[in-house]
Image (tube, rainbow, N blue to C red):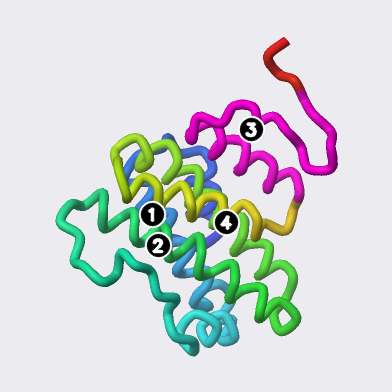
Amino acid sequence: MKGVHSEYQELVLADETPAALERALSLARAVASGQRQNQERWFNMVNGTTPAHHPSSLHRPRSLAARRTDEVVRALTGLPSRAEEWRDKVPESQFSMLFDTLLIVFQQAYFSLLPKVGGAKRNELLKAFLAFSRALPRVADRLHVEGLVRLSMGESEAAVDVPGGNRFNFFR
């Protein structure tokens, strides 16, 4: 794999495709496992804990889209909670890099994977997106991600409501 920073920069500019989603997931694994600046603690964070259980892991998915959905769900729900547990033990730049990388995973999955999955897998992916939005440390990122997800769920009113009673009306 290229250096983490150069791969990140390329993915920021990449079109949303299944190949770019795979690269983003690989980058997230690299950052979380300590391949960035030899940070052993990130490796321990990812590999020293039991993976989160997801209902979809009980059955072997048939399609590539279903398998990729499971991988995205694990990345966007498992890594943020484990990263938060380790936040005081790793440099802030490492923590920030992980979440920035996971935002790329979200973007790639939202635009290249979500349109290809339906039914229970789509609902599972949307639920993971919402959980991820709540885990984001920056409010602007939280609102952006949740707004996109709510629009995909057909909840346009919820997409423009901002917590705390403020409301942005983009449709005037």
Residue 20, horizontal then vertical, whole percent? 38, 46
> Mark 4 touching mark 1, by CB under 8 A?
no
Q: Main secondary structure of the magenta part?
A: helix
Residue denoted by label 3: 159
Label located before the other in sequence (3 or 1): 1
Residue at figure coordinates x 57%, y 57% from the top left: 131
Query: In terms of secondary structure, where does tag 4 sit?
Result: helix
> Mark 1 touching mark 2, by CB under 8 A?
yes
Q: Report the side of 142 relative to 165 (left or right).
A: left
Residue 92, by quadrant, is: bottom right
Residue 46, horizontal then vertical, whole percent? 49, 80
Magenta region, residue range: 139-168
Query: In terms of secondary structure, where does tag 1 sit?
Result: helix
Query: In terms of secondary structure, where does tag 2 sit?
Result: helix
Which label number is shown at residue 26?
2
Q: CA distance from mark 3 to mark 4?
A: 16 Å
Residue closer to the observer: 8 or 109: 109
Amino acid type, label 3:
Ala
